[in-house]
Amino acid sequence: MARPRAALAGRPPSCTTTGIIVTLLLDTGAIYALADADDAWHIPMRDFLKQQRQSLLVPVTVIPEAAYLIRKRLGPPVETRFADSLAAGEIAVENLTLADLERSAQLLRTYEFLGFVDASIVSVAERLKLRALVTTDRRDFGRVRPNHVAAFRLLP
């Protein structure tokens, strides 16, 4: 799975005018949409990310879920391209902390419709103070009330 925009070769992570690094946090649906040219979200996701300069980040919990869906629906070669893109650093991987796991469990109790992977995405976004999520899941993420903003901005 090639990055939908030119590699960041030699470019530092994008910064705002205040010097704060801006990161885009991706969920499983966003990654799958990039991998599947037939997915309804493929073109909007690809075009959106082509226009962005921010670094891309996924919680570690997203990787097995995305890899499973990609392999099952698109085949081993596409899964291998996804693994290659991660190994090349095209998408950074964020590990979970103990506090993230505790918060994820709390989110699961609060939002019964939310699965563990999505709860971990919310937990990481809260810890990193990220206000936006790159997602195809408007329904679930739109219902979650993070602890650092009134609601997530759902992109694209």
Image: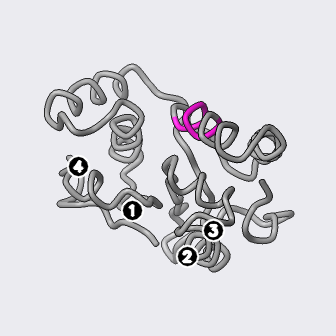
Residue 67 located left or right of residue 45: right
Mark 4: which secondary structure?
loop
Residue under numbered circle 1:
132
Residue 86 located left or right of residue 96: right
Q: Overall secondary structure of the magenta stretch?
A: helix
Q: Which mark is residue 70?
A: none
Which residue is rendered at x = 58% and y = 64% of the image?
Answer: 39
Residue 80 located left or right of residue 46: right
Pointer 1 or 4: first along the chain = 1
Mark 1: which secondary structure?
strand
Q: Amino acid at mark 1?
A: Ala
Q: Which mark is residue 14?
A: 3
Residue 126 lies, with reference to residue 6, above or below; the image says above
Which residue is rendered at x = 63% and y = 59% of the image?
Answer: 55
Pointer 3 or 4: first along the chain = 3
Q: Report, in whole angstroms, how far the alpha carbon at label 1 lies from the one at label 2.
A: 16 Å
Q: Nearer the viewer, mark 3 or mark 2?
A: 2
Q: Amino acid at mark 2?
A: Pro
Which residue is rendered at x = 34% and y = 24% of the image?
Answer: 99
Q: Are marks 3 and 4 in contact (CB under 8 Å)?
A: no
Q: Which residues are magenta?
A: 62-67
From the viewer's side, name the closer residue of 44 and 155. 44
Residue under numbered circle 4:
146
Position in image of residue 108 (x %, y %): 23, 30
